[in-house]
Image: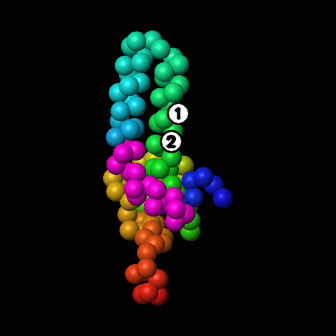
Amino acid sequence: MSLETATHSRLMLARRWEAIARFTMFGVIAAMVLVWVIGQPFIAFVLVFVAMLAAWLFNLRCERCGWMVYRQFGTADVDRAKDQFLAPLYSKQLWKQPEACSKCGHSFRFDDTNSKAA
């Protein structure tokens, strides 16, 4: 299993920390510019490590089809939508975790109400 597979526990973690991770990413970008001006490469490496931990939440992929959780399927340009590599990069980015996968419809909500309805 890949570290990017959206299992129940990883989806819950991403739902809980998505706002904090997004602000962390923006803060790291601003800090990287400041560190570049100051000229401290060691601090830059530490910032990159922190950014990788935050970015991990936004790279989660659906268990069933492998599409990225935080990307809207079918929103890429026509010329890039056919390319397996470029389609996720140019698709619309979602700011909140969706209820289900935008490609296959696999539910990302795991609670007692879903299991009772089945």
* Callout 1: SS: helix
10 Å crowding of disc 1: few (<14), some (14-19), many (20+): few
Going by the numbered disc 2, the residue's amino acid type is Leu
Quadrant into which the N terminus falls: bottom right
Q: Nearer the viewer, residue 26 or 84?
A: 26
Horizontal side of 3 relative to 29 (left or right) equals right
Q: Quadrant of residue 24?
A: top left
Q: Residue at x 51, y 58 (%)?
A: 10
Segment colored magenta = 7-22
Q: Quadrant of residue 14?
A: bottom left
Does 63 sit above or below residue 94?
below
Going by the numbered disc 1, the residue's amino acid type is Phe
- Check if residue 9 falls in the magenta segment: yes
* Callout 2: SS: helix
Q: Position of residue 23 (x, y in %)?
A: 34, 40
- Which residue bears the numbered disc 2? 53
Tags 1 and 2 touching, CB below 8 Å = yes
Label drawn at residue 89? none
Q: Position of residue 85 (x, y in %)?
A: 54, 49
Horizontal side of 116 relative to 85 (left or right) equals left
Most extreme residue toward the right is: 1
Horizontal side of 36 relative to 49 (left or right) equals left
Q: Position of residue 22 (x, y in %)?
A: 37, 44
Q: Position of residue 80 (x, y in %)?
A: 46, 50
Q: Residue at x 48, y 21 (%)?
A: 43
Does 113 sit above or below residue 1?
below
Q: Nearer the viewer, residue 61 or 89?
A: 61
Q: Residue at x 42, y 65 (%)?
A: 102
- Which residue bears the numbered disc 1? 49
Q: Main secondary structure of the magenta part?
A: helix
Question: How many numbered marks appear?
Answer: 2
